[in-house]
């Protein structure tokens, strides 16, 4: 499987040259051909931008000059895959710079037509930034499209914190502005679309937990059979944070439990080794208790402070008097996304958002 940076490689760029040359043989595409040779040291995003800029240079006169061969190329089944990212980006960029309603609306149509070949979500950001009101009016129409790819584009392309994409400041500043799009899609028949809706709402939870809880509550009041699963995924960040309102929406109220642990049999973990811990949870109440159980590792930082990371354990309903036993191993093997420091760390349980007292352990030096 290729690395991310290789998804737009020389082969993809050369295929894009062939596809456009087939429909526009009179254009030498000199800039696009030259861009093929500069891709190697670039990241994925940079490669897309380089090919986008080359396309704009090879079609410098107008939006119509650029979009005409692209529309013609759509008849080819080979005009697909990762070459579509720089193509849609070029279409959106030229439409925004031309600053006409005709070019803007046509570019939105082209993005919708191409999104099934490779998502147009990144290019859409250019038009959202250029004219958010006009773009959202058209995006709202996409929510009733027969094509699930277009419906997903409506949700995914307007996410506040879409990975790999430029931010749209107005969406972040006015987070409720995309809620009507999500309202139109949360019951969508496609899991592909619903997962995007959940991820979009989870994005909003970073800064707007009350808006997210209010929205999820409305959906649960008027659910489809798939709504509970969608809401559970959408609230995952708030659940990890122990937000009591989010937990209550999913049925996790204040627990009546007795917790023993976490118990760490060996309080010295070798560098790159594994922390083992156990715990038990007993329902001490007279009614069944629905539990969301996580654990928290408080990692030591270079400056001596700690930072908490929450990890999922399980969800379970305990009958009165029932005891749940937990046995867990947590790896400290080196990974690229987290740097470890030797010294005193700690581990705690979190039950329905309420953390236990942490148990310390020592991560030995390398």
Image (spheres, rainbow, N blue to C red):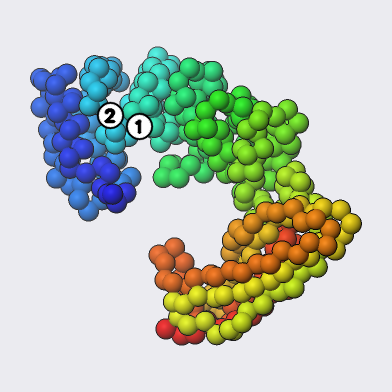
User: Is residue 240 shown above or below 107?
Assistant: below
Q: Is residue 204 visible?
A: no
Residue 80: numbered disc: 2
Indicate the secondary structure of the residue bearing disc 1: loop
> How many numbered circles are shown?
2
Residue at the far top: name it.
102
**What residue is rendered at 26% in x and 34% in y?**
83
Please state if 47 lies on the left or on the right of 340 as rendered: left
Among the 4 quarters of the image, the one containing residue 7: top left
**What residue is rendered at 57% in x and 44% in y?**
203
Among the 4 quarters of the image, the one containing residue 307: bottom right
User: Is residue 303 shown above or below 116?
Assistant: below
User: Is residue 212 shown above or below 60?
Assistant: below
Tell me whether the residue at label 1 lies in contact with that at label 2, contact meaning CB atoms closer than 8 angstroms: yes
Q: Disc 1 designates what residue?
A: 118
Q: Estimate the x, y position of residue 106 in percent, counting from the top left.
A: 38, 17
Camera-side residue: 35 or 222?
Answer: 222
Please state if 72 lies on the left or on the right of 293 as rendered: left
Please state if 197 lies on the left or on the right of 55 as rendered: right
Q: Estimate the x, y position of residue 27 in percent, counting from the top left.
A: 12, 23
């Amino acid at each position: 499987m290729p690395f991310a940076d290789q998804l737009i490689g020389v082969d993809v760029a050369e295929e894009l040259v062939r596809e456009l040359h087939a429909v526009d043989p009179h254009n030498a595409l000199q800039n696009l051909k030259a861009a093929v040779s500069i891709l190697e040291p670039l990241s994925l995003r940079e490669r897309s931008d380089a090919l986008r800029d080359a396309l704009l240079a090879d079609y410098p006169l107008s939006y119509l000059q650029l979009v005409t061969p692209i529309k013609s190329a759509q008849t080819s089944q080979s005009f697909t895959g990762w070459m579509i990212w720089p193509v849609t980006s070029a279409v959106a960029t030229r439409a925004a710079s031309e600053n006409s309603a005709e070019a803007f609306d046509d570019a939105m149509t082209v993005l919708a037509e191409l999104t099934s070949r490779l998502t147009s979500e990144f290019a859409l950001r250019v038009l959202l930034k250029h004219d958010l009101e006009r773009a959202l009016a058209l995006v709202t129409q996409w929510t009733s499209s027969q094509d699930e790819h277009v419906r997903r584009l409506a949700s995914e392309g307007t996410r506040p914190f879409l990975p790999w994409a430029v931010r749209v400041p107005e969406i972040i500043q006015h987070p409720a502005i995309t809620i009507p799009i999500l309202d139109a899609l949360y019951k969508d028949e496609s899991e592909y679309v619903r997962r995007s809706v959940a991820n979009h709402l989870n994005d909003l939870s970073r800064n707007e937990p009350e808006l997210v809880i209010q929205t999820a509550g409305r959906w649960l009041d008027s659910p489809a059979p798939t709504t509970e699963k969608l809401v559970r995924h959408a609230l995952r960040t708030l659940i990890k944070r122990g937000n009591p309102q989010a937990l209550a929406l999913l049925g996790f109220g204040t627990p009546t439990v007795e917790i023993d642990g976490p118990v760490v049999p060996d309080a010295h973990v070798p560098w790159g080794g594994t922390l083992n811990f156990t715990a038990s949870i007993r329902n001490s109440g007279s009614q069944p208790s629905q539990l969301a159980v996580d654990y928290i590792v408080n990692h030591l930082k270079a400056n001596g402070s700690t930072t908490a990371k929450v990890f999922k354990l399980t969800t379970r309903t305990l009958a009165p008097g029932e005891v749940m036993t937990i046995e867990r191993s947590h790896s400290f093997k080196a990974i690229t996304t987290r740097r470890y420091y030797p010294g005193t760390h700690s581990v705690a349980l979190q039950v329905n958002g309420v953390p236990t007292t942490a148990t310390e352990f020592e991560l030995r030096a390398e």
